[in-house]
Image (cartoon, helix red, strand yellow):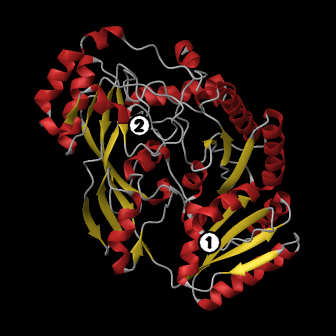
Amino acid sequence: MTELIKFLEPNAQIISKRSSIISGLAEILPDDCLITDERELVPFETDAFIAYRRLPLAVVLPETTEQVAEVVKYCHEHEVPIVPRGAGTSLAGGAIPQEDAIVIGLSKMNRILDVDLANRCAVVQAGVTNIAISQETDSEGFFYAPDPSSQLACTIGGNIGMNSGGAHCLKYGVTTNNLLALKMVMFDGTVIDLGGKALDMPGYDLIGLLCGSEGQMGIITEATVKLLAKPEGAKPVLFGFDTPEDAGRCVRDVIGAGIIPVAIEYMDKPAIEICEAFANAGYPMDVEALLIVEVEGSEAEMDAMLDKIIQVAKTHNVKTVKESQSAFEAALIWKGRKSAFGATGRIADYMCMDGTVPLSQLAFVLEGTAKIIEKYGLRVANVFHAGDGNMHPLILFNMNDPEESVKAEQAGMDILRLCVDAGGCLTGEHGVGIEKRDLMTHQYSKEDLDQQMAVRAAFDPQWIFNPSKVFPLEVREDA
């Protein structure tokens, strides 16, 4: 990839002190919690964004909150930048380090500390994978609602950093709606506890502020998350349409009619073909757009809601309605959808966008996206959370072709501008990271950004947490 995105200039003075910094960290951590060999640092030089790479100064893998606090305190005293890292599944470059930065990876902090069914919550370390919570509580009839497609690998700490969602966030909300408490290490190594097991706590909603702060205000080491009772039943249904616009208008009118299924997912023709080839999910192949609509509850509740949805779909020329007939078929339908990103990676390099638009603008933005992709001579596969307007166009290109790489990045920026101009925003769940950083001035005024940076600086006066991310570099310089 060409360097369209700029990083802060690495601090040469810090780099020159690498040996002494490593020695200081070695006094704090066990031997197996510190990585300094250049070859062993390579896996940490990028994340799932993959477009940019930077080798960090060192990587630490602490096992306890106390170790995290000691490392942060040391970095604060020596003014060493810190990049928090979960599983590295960030699609916006949120975990890409810099040459003068220490990566604090939380993969060893992967224990579920407490499952409290009486209060319907679980206390987990930040390195616990998303799906592990539901697996732990499944036999008791409970689950953790947010379910990003990367839930097999992504961790709760990363989910909190980017305020991740998933297919079922239409009904259950995103990460911030499912958090009760956090344990966080501040910029100077101080450890604070926010929230609790009660459903509402007095004072400012600092948990709401920290969720989605992209690791720029502190390092989350533990979280208390809500557990929900599993529904009596659930049924995904496939709706096929002859045009993407018909599918988009159908989503708009379903939600507009006050019907809230547990999920509404969208795929266009290229995405259908890619996912079907991978999962053999039984998707209809003679349609241009597909909606996966899942309803849940008792049989009577599911049938009643489906009847309403089908009536709306008929007004938009629905071509195919196919209900899953078994748990096996339902699992296949979701396997296809949740494998979309990986399946696409089998056939091409891709860049995944993450704009969110009002439902009334879905059809308009789909049409605009097609025109943008045609303008740059590229291909796109659209697969996204239609129910809340969180779009994920996958721009297909050849990363080894510098010209195509530039076109892909420019097309992605144009699509995100389109989302904002349609009344939406730059990100729904992937975060800003470095990918969308330079578009923040398209979404916000200077006054807006100044206020956001003032809040960030209140938590991290030295700006050592996750530098180069979220705020355009020229805006920071002018602040």
Image quadrant where one finds the N terminus: top right
Say what secondary structure mark 2 lies in: loop
Residue 106 in the image, given as x and y percentages of width and height: 30, 44
Question: Residue at image x 39%, y 80%?
Answer: 141
252 horizontally vs 338: left or right: right
Q: Residues within 10 Å of mark 1 (few under 14, many from 20)?
A: many
Work out whether 213 lies above or below 391: above
162 horizontally vs 412: left or right: left
217 horizontally vs 184: left or right: right
Q: Mark 1 points at which residue?
A: 281
Residue 395 in the image, given as x and y percentages of width and height: 68, 42
Question: Residue at image x 51%, y 51%?
Answer: 164
Q: In which quarter of the image is residue 170?
A: bottom right
Q: Is residue 120 visible?
A: no
* Whole-number angstrom distance, CA of label 2 to CA of label 1: 37 Å
Q: Can residue 151 be seen in this view?
A: yes
Which of label 2 and label 1 is nearer to you? 1
Question: Residue at image x 44%, y 31%?
Answer: 96
Work out whether 99 lies above or below 92: above
Under mark 1, the amino acid is Ala
Looking at the image, which is closer to me, 198 or 442? 442
Q: In which quarter of the image is residue 236?
A: bottom right
Residue 52 in the image, given as x and y percentages of width and height: 51, 28
Under mark 2, the amino acid is Gly
Q: Mark 2 points at which residue?
A: 215
Report the number of discs. Answer: 2
Looking at the image, which is closer to me, 404 or 62? 404
Q: Earlier in the sequence, mark 2 or mark 1?
A: 2
Question: Residue at image x 46%, y 78%?
Answer: 230
Residue 184 in the image, given as x and y percentages of width and height: 31, 42
Say what secondary structure mark 1 lies in: loop
